Image (tube, rainbow, N blue to C red):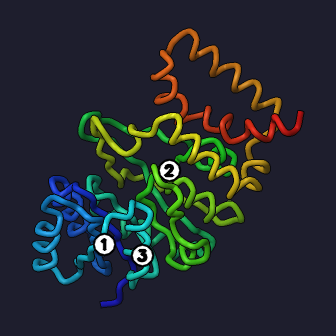
Amino acid sequence: MNIKVSVIVPCYNQSQFLDEALTSVYNQTAKDWECIIVDDGSKDQTKEVAKTWCDKDSRFSYTYQENAGLSAARNKGINNAKGMYVLPLDADDKIADNYLALALNTFKTDETVKVVYANAEKFGAVSGKWNLKDFSLRNLSRNNMIFCSALFRKSDWERIGGYDVNMLYGWEDWELWIAMLKNGGEVVKLQNTCFYYRIKENSMLTSIDRNKADYLLNHLNVKHADFFVKHYGTFQDLDREIKMLKETHKTQMSSEKYVIDVFFSKFLGFSVFGKYKKNRN
């Protein structure tokens, strides 16, 4: 079979959810895919669950590495991928059965497209539509609105050097989209709901505290300074947003909630540009 899409499923101690994720891959209406399960040093039943699927369908494969983090696990899977297109899928999420077919048709009809994603819903501890801002490079300079399970060409992943393993605590998908799109390329958001994002009480994102966030943003600041300077906007725009956020913080949020709820949105821009503003004055 001619493999068009390589679905990469990194798994670190998420075996209790892995069946759901792999079932959603198995049920795809498009059949020309492979699914590479990357066990990132799990201590649970990840290997046993993965082997069951490998025995069931030869399109599934399993590989193990000592724990090296999400970026390294995705890179390992993509390095071994045979498909022209890649879909990362975390072991606790799932996709609609027509996602690959719709995305492949989009790539087929427009060669300028670099990334295809879709509408999304949350499930688990929280359920409902996941409202994401429309994509633009300006919006991307403020926050990430493309979830990790979007499709892209393996050649574009190779061109930018893959996922950045220096994004130790998260946001590796945000960095990937910046690197992949900052010099051009179209992004298409399917109107179908094709991605289901599991919300848990504790996750990698909720564990990011102020120090970790500062580390990640400083790394982004250095690596993609050209992108942020070009697309964020004027310092006057920045000052206005900072004042609005501080007022929100003062009247509505505790300090801890401010970091968790606001820091993930517009306040990201302040952290990235704080150094530029100080240097400019």
Residue drawn at (68%, 42%) of the image? 272
Q: Which percent across, then down, holds residue 238?
A: 75, 31
The kind of residue tagged 2 is Trp
Tell me the SS state at disc 3: helix
Tell me the SS state at disc 2: loop
Q: Residue 78 carries which label?
A: 3
Tell me which label, 1 or 2, sits earlier in the chain. 1
Quickly name the residue at label 2: 171
Residue drawn at (73%, 43%) of the image? 232
Indicate the quadrant containing the N terminus: top left, top right, bottom left or bottom right: bottom left
Mark 2 crowd level (few <14, some 14–19, many ≥20, 10 Å Cα): many
162 sits to left or right of 75: right
Mark 3 crowd level (few <14, some 14–19, many ≥20, 10 Å Cα): many
Figure check: 133 above or below 109: above
Q: Which percent across, then down, holds residue 129?
A: 37, 38
Front of the two marks 3 and 1: 1
